[in-house]
Image (cartoon, rainbow, N blue to C red):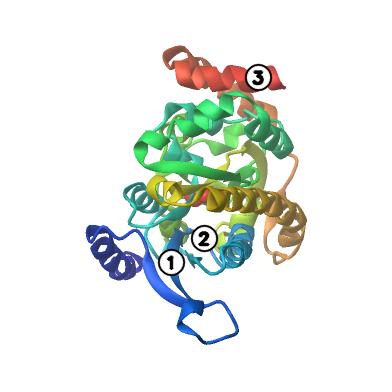
Amino acid sequence: MKRLASLFFIVPCIFLSACGNLYSIGSTNINASNSDDSKVKTKILRLAFAQTESHPQYIVMQEFSDNFKEATNGKYEIRLFPNETLGSQREAFEQCQTGIINLAIVSNTYTGSVSDYYKAFDMPFIFNNVSESINFIRTNPVMDEVKSSVEPYGIKIAEYLTAGVRSMYTHKPIHTVADMKGMKIRTMESDIYIKMMNLFKASASPMSMGELYTAMQSGVVDGAENNEVTYVNSKHYEVAPFWSQTDHLIVPDWLIVNKETYDNFTPEEKIIFDEECMKAADRVNELWGKEVDSLMASLPDTISVTSDVDIQSFKDAVQPLYDELTSKNSEIKKVYDAILESQ
Ligand code: GCU
C-alpha cells in the first residue's frame, strides 16, 4: 500500500524533473503591502524523511525550514515528506542524486553505497559514545575528503545528524552474543551489517524501515536493531517487546542536498543554508539527549529492557571484520585509522 502511495508522489516528481525543473514554484507575499512588487516566487525544495513527525530530526527540520524561509525572505520553502511518503531511503537517496527531490535525510549506509570512505562508520563498536562520533565528524581533517567524495554522485553533504546508539530488539532477551544464534534480524541494506550479523551467528535480513513493522509482526524476522527513538516512535516495541542494550553501532545520518540545488544558491544563500544546517545538527543532538530516557520510560510495563548485556562477547565476535574491511580497502582504512588515532 505504501509503495503504491509513493508512486502517486514519485510520478509527478519525475515529470517535474523531466521538465528540467528542480523546484516547484509557489507565491509568497513577504511584505504587508499587496503590491505586485511584494510578491516573491517561492521555490519549493522537497525533503524526504523516512520516519514519523514526532522524530527529533523531523521536528528540527521543520524549524530549519521556517528559519531558511525567513532568512531568504520567502524565496525558499523546504517542504518535508515524512514516513517514506516519497519512497524508501534508498529511493530518496537516488531521487536526491538526480534532482527529483532536493534534500533527504539518509543513513550512512546510502552515502556508503557511492563512497567507500563512509563504510568505516558502519563498523560496529567503532566509537565509544555519541559525543566521540560527533566530535570526529565535525573536526577531523579527513572529513573534508570524506564529505566531498559524494559530490561526483550529484549530492552534497549538508550536515551529519545524530542517530544515537543502536541496540537489539526481539521476542526474547539477549544477554550475550550466544543468544543471537539462529535469529533472523532485520538490518539496513549494507554488506557490513550482513557480515556483522553473520559474525553474531544470527542471519541478516536487509530491508527498508517502512517494511519492518509488518515483517516483525508476521514473523518474517525475529527482530531488528536500532536506536531508542526509532524503537519507540515507530512503535516497534509493540511487535518486538524485548530491548537488549547491545550498543553495537553508532552510525550517523546525513542531511544531503542535491548538488545542483546547492550550486544554484547565491553565495549569501549558501552561507545562510550552511549556518542553518549547523544549527539544526546541534538542535538534533540537544533534543535527542533529552528524549532518549523519557521515551524509554514511557514504554508500557510489558516491555522488557535488558541492560546487563555482555557487550564484550559482541565485540569479540566481530574482530575479524576490522581486518577484512581495512586490509582490502584503502578508503575505509584511511577513515578507520583516523578514528583510532583520534581516540
Ligand atoms: C535509524 C536511522 C535512519 C535509518 C534507520 C534504519 O533510525 O536514523 O536513518 O533509516 O535507522 O534502520 O533504517
**Amino acid type, callout 2:** Gln
Residue 79 percent location from the top left of the image: 48, 67
Element class at badge 2:
loop
Say which of 320 and 310 sits in front.
Answer: 320
Q: Name the residue under label 1.
A: 44
Q: Is residue 316 left or right of residue 260?
A: right
The CA span between labels 3 and 2 is 32 Å
- Residue 259 lies, with reference to residue 219, above or below; the image says above
Q: Residue 117 carries which label?
A: none
- Say which residue label 3 marks: 340
Q: Which residue is drawn at 33% across and 57% down?
A: 100
Q: Where is residue 28 in the image (x, y as percent from the top left)?
A: 49, 77
What crowding class fits label 1: few (fewer than 14 Cα within 10 Å), some (14-19), or many (20 or more)?
Answer: many
Q: Does dot 1 land on a helix, a strand or a loop?
A: strand
The amino acid type, in three-letter code, at marker 1 is: Ile
Between 95 and 183, the one nearer to me in the picture = 95
Q: Quadrant of residue 144?
A: top right
Spot the residue most to the bottom. Answer: 34
Marks 1, 3: nearer the viewer: 1
In front here: 70 or 58? 70
Residue at the spot of label 2: 51
- Residue sitting nearer the eye, 197 or 285: 285
| Residue 248 in picture, x, y percent from top left | 62, 36
Query: Are there few (<14), some (14-19), or many (20+) residues within 10 Å of tag 2?
Result: many
Asked whether mark 2 lies closer than 8 Å to ligand 1, one says yes
